[in-house]
Image: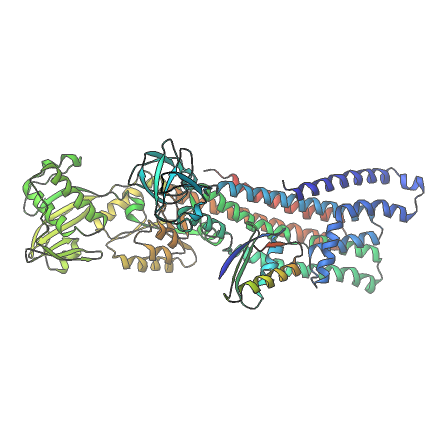
Amino acid sequence: MTAKLRKNLYRILITLALFAVLLVLEHTGRFEAWALPWYAEFALFALPYLLIGYDVILKACKTIRNGQVFDEHFLMMIATFAAFAIGEYPEALAVMLFYQTGEWFQSYAVGKSRQSIKDLMEIAPEIAHVLCEDGSFTEEDPEEVSVGAVILVKPGEKIPLDGEVTDGESFLDTAALTGESVPRKASPGDTVISGCVNGEGTLRILVTKEYEDSTVAKILDLVENASNKKAETEQFITRFARYYTPVVTIGAVLLAVIPPLAIGAAWSEWIRRACVFLIVSCPCALVISVPLGFFGGIGAASRMGILVKGSNYLEAVARVKTVVFDKTGTLTKGNFRVMQILPAGAENEKIIEDPSGNDAWNEAQIELLRLAALAEQYSNHPIARSVREAYEEVLRADASAEMNMEDIRDVTEEAGHGVRAVYKGKELLAGNEKLMTSHEIQTGADAVSGTIVHVAHDGTYLGAIVISDELKEETKGALAQMKRAGVKKCVMLTGDHKATAGAVAAEAGIDEVHSELLPGDKVAALENLMKEEADEKVAFVGDGVNDAPVLMRADVGIAMGAMGSDAAIEAADIVLMDDRITKIATVVDIARRTLTIVKQNIVFAIGVKLLILALGALGLASMWLAVFADVGVAVIAILNSMRMLGYRV
Amino acid sequence: MKKKFNCEVDCADCAAKMEDAIKKIDGVIDARVNFMTQKFTLEAEDDRFDEIVQLAVKACKKVEPDAVITVS
């Protein structure tokens, strides 16, 4: 509690005590018994009134000097002054007292939720131990450490900057970033990310990024800016507030003046009713509860390792009915393995379950693998990598074999198709069915499931290599969870062969598959889906490596496994720090709950205000009721918003 | 140029009012007063930046005398 809050609390408590005493005196008829003149009674109420309300009056005077008429302090001052004027002393004091109580509670609650978000984001490192030339270490602010410096991270400390381990071994706790404390091993050569907490070992790290480019700085910046991107609901309420206060204030003036002039009604009665209007004219309960709700939702998500870049995206996710997935690395593990090698015309196919048993491959198979590996030697595609890895294992098993690079020339990669190269002066092709068709090569009819790399040399089909990727264990459950969270359709986009894609989709529980897509086609496929569901939001989930354009095009782009991947963090609207697909259902759930809370707050706050306005105009609501309702609504809306901060899966 | 300042604002509505007032200043490209994080972000023309900051502080004083913007 800040000093300001504490001081105000004392003021409220003292005034409350004085008010209670005055009320008792009044109700037991002491004032009459003592035959107090009106001014003495006025003074008795005015003193505690000034104690509790002096700052409101001061602020009101300042704003009125600046020409701001619809300021809440000014309106409160007018309402209470009017109450004094018509002789309702206890009302005047009560209104100011409860108004201040409400304000106090608001500051307290907002401060609390602000603090809990800060606690969530306690990932910013305080110091870095930098290695000096003489071998000693100095403590420096992480912001001042430059790239290339070597830093020491002691057990239990946060890693201050992104870098590469040069010495030492340890386990890192990534909980602050991913929301899950699965320790990661860090040994020399590994890249480590700032914000992780070092385990038992001491590490020496070569800094590869400056602080402002490091993961921690990016995340903090992102979360801090998240509440800058306003949701539609938030904009609506700000606009509403802009009209609400002036309208109600003008209503109050009309209410006070017209009936007494028109039908000669009692001035005091209608001024009292107008005061009720002034009291409920303050829009703060509305304006605060909406962003606070979103803030809570974003906070709850970031604790789970889900970074939401703005309230608007949280709002969009809540309305997502279609989720589109990239297959590789999202639904599947993305670790491809060569499962079968099928030289053309041979019956000797062999399915290996354990890749260590590679010596069981025969010569024809190894030759096919060698050619494929040669063609794919420069490609970064995960499939190419798996082919190379398989061949490297063969090389390891047989020391006499050697990869002969000399004869290979002019390697060109055809995105989405495969690789074309010149080997021993003749064209060597390694890629999918489409690549073969475009070069008029007949492939063997196949009914295998998995990704297939066909190999052809000098126009002759040599055979196929079958590579498989496994579904992540949690994929199936995660999709079911998403359906329960309100997602209607799950779509998969993939460059894979139709049969393979269909098999994966069936296993995972995907509703719609678009297969054999080139990277460029994915955007088009997504756009078609978005057109189909024009009223509803479409989310795209990818790993952010080669699908950045799709991530950006979707209503909501969700990048997975983004820890340490700048491109993904940049392109996506929602970032999952680890690659657990179950987090998507979590973020949908968080978003839905947040939006429900926000809607409850809006309906409740506007509803109660309108009710009090109606009752006030009819003379059925006293100023007491009005101030209770107004403060009560604000407090309830804030408490409701704060529920999100305690969200657990 | 874009710069972030700490600021103390008491209510969300006040933050919105300050934002509106600052946006009306000549030379301001974008302004955000974030009530939740108590941060004021100003994006304005480079060569007049310091002057605009002063104008912004003055504008805030006018609509919300309570608010404190820390210009360091």
Asked if residue A517 is positioned above or below residue A151 in the image, the reply reads below
Q: Is residue A26 left or right of residue A10?
A: right
- The reply to whether residue A386 is visible in this rendering is yes
Residue extending farthest to the front is: A134
Q: Nearer the viewer, residue A459 or A484?
A: A459
Say which residue appears at 67% left-offset and 47% top-offset.
A103
Q: Is residue A390 left or right of residue A117?
A: left
Coordinates of residue A595 in the picture (x, y in percent):
51, 49
Say which residue appears at 37% left-offset and 36% top-offset.
A172
- The reply to whether residue A448 is visible in this rendering is no
Coordinates of residue B67 in the picture (x, y in percent):
63, 54
Coordinates of residue A590 in the picture (x, y in percent):
47, 44
Q: Nearer the viewer, residue A621 or A121?
A: A121
Q: Nearer the viewer, residue B26 or A550?
A: B26
Quadrant placement of the N terminus of chain A = top right
Tell me the colour scheme of the image: rainbow
Q: Is residue A451 left or right of residue B13?
A: left
> How many marks on residues?
0
Residue extending farthest to the bottom is: B26
Q: Nearer the viewer, residue A587 or A599?
A: A587
Q: Is residue A567 left or right of residue A278?
A: left
Quadrant in the rendering for residue A346: top left
Coordinates of residue A569 in the picture (x, y in percent):
38, 51
Quadrant placement of the C terminus of chain A = top left
